[in-house]
Amino acid sequence: MKNRVEIYDTTLRDGSQGEGVNFSVADKLRLAERIDAFGMHYIEGGWPGSNPKDIEFFAQARTRKWKHARVAAFGSTRRKNVAVADDPQVRLLLEAETPVVTIFGKTWLLHVKEVLHTSPDENLAMIRDTIRFLKSKGKFVIYDAEHAFDGYKNDPEYAIATWQAAEQGGADTVVLCDTNGGSLPEEVSRITQSAGEHLKTALGIHTHNDIGLGVANALAGIAAGATQVQGTINGYGERTGNCNLTTVIPNLALKLNLKCLPVASIRKLKELSQYVDEIANIRHDPRQPWVGITAFAHKGGMHVNAVQKVAHSFEHASPEVVGNSRRILISDLAGRSNIVMKAHELGFKIGNETPELKGILARIKELEHEGYEFEAAEGSLALLIRKILKRQEPPFTVEGYHVSMRRDGPVSVCQATIKVQVDGQTAHTVAEGDGPVNALDGAMRLALVGFYPKLKNVKLTDYKVRILDTSTGTAAKTRVLIQSTDGKEEWGTVGASDNIIEASLQALVDSMEYRLMKK
């Protein structure tokens, strides 16, 4: 195993082939700049021979200065029985004017005969000729050996011959691709080692995640002699995705102690992961290894108690090394340590000997049994702790409400009336909305803003409903989770009831009360 590993990012090309992923030219340029600033060694921008969007990307990319990464254009070997200088796709690769050109070619005889409909010798010539031509134009050439492992398992001698043809053409790196994503780590290790025994050229590894082993196979390839890993941020890619760079990078750097990216960059890994998701308009996966918000979340009481004493007793690494943070979850599985650590997060000074701690824990478990859930409702949890610790009266009370619906031509209009009391004074307001919850939110906000002007900036950003017992049909208990913001911070609140409007009102009241509680 060499001590340095290059990271080749193909989020903009291979990642964009994932279902639901669609980058504009502006998106690709923003992502490329962020990935470059992160310190990646290569950024594969796309296939200039496949669509006008990628041609435009390269036209703009060549006018920009890149700090760390070398931009690569991606394409294929020349077509069969066509001189490489006459192939329009190869010409477009040169017109992209990137310092690096990555081309793929066939390893598997099945593809040579049944897909390309050409001879094994012509396929070798296509590989050799294309690389030699690109090298003559001053390009750094990376050869992606498509279906390298399936091809080797089918005919090892021919697979090796294709890789040697790339080396003879002058390829700077030969990358073994598990294109179907179905190989096992032992196979990747054995075949990569065999490639190293027959080639002097540097080796790379490009894996897919079809059987959930994309990262494991990449690490197996590195252990067997590859010095370049290709992958995508957050594992975007066709079918079930590519090797996830946000997982493989910290494993290389922090588990295998290999030089790949600066320590300062790795500390921003979670930030990069979230940024790419945001540009792609994809909800961040909370269970991503290393960078997901639950990657260092603790829920079981015994676990939290141990973490409180010795953090690494239940953590394989410090969350800060990738820019993540530890989270303590509260549920009916919680113990005293959960409450203490979570209370500290929320700004309360309590310890294991605080008299009210037992009451807080009992109340949380009681409410969870009734259908409440506090993992995503820290606002409601903070209110619960505050009320038990400080025994303070709430800043307002809802004395009554009414929600109705009327037809206005083809449109349904919801109307809500609410009556609130603040320090002995009463406000009675009415508001209309797109639905009963929206109308109720508007009416309550209207009633409270006169007493508490700061609530004017509070807005709902998310509203989720979950039916807790579907077997009871329309009489089922409902849990409502609301996410709110005042423009500076976000918080979650929860309500639970047989009546969805009542559950929504509980979460809305907690949202307003939490904002008033904050200093």
Image: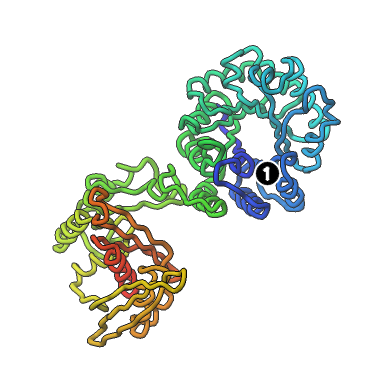
Q: Is residue 367 above or below residue 393?
A: above
Give the side of residue 91 with respect to residue 303, left or right.
Answer: right
- Can you give x and y, in whole percent of width and height, for residue 454 in the image? 39, 79
Looking at numbered disc 1 in the image, what kind of residue is underneath it?
A: Gly
Give the side of residue 39 with respect to residue 369, left or right.
Answer: right
What residue is shown at x 29% (from left), y 75% (from top)? 402
Quarter placement of the N terminus: top right
Give the side of residue 11 with respect to residue 462, left or right.
Answer: right
The residue positioned farthest toward the bottom in the image shown: 425
Task: For mark 1, give the secondary structure.
Answer: strand
Numbered marks: total: 1
Q: Is residue 147 above or below residue 71?
A: above
User: Label 1: how many residues lie within 10 Å, few (<14), some (14-19) or many (20+)?
Assistant: many
Residue 459 seen from this side: no
Quarter placement of the C terminus: bottom left
Q: Is residue 282 above or below residue 455?
A: above
Colour scheme shown: rainbow
State the residue in front, 385 or 279.
Answer: 279
State the residue in front, 333 or 108.
Answer: 108
What residue is shown at x 34% (from left), y 80% (from top)? 448
- Can you give x and y, in whole percent of width and height, for residue 271 in the image? 50, 53
User: Which quadrant of the figure has residue 198?
Assistant: top right
| Residue that label 1 marks | 45
- Can you give x and y, in whole percent of width and height, for residue 103 in the image? 71, 32
Residue 255 seen from this side: yes
- Can you give x and y, in whole percent of width and height, for residue 253 in the image? 50, 38
What residue is shown at x 44% (from left), y 44% (from top)? 288
Q: Is residue 151 above or below residue 300?
A: above
What residue is shown at x 47% (from left), y 37% (from top)? 251
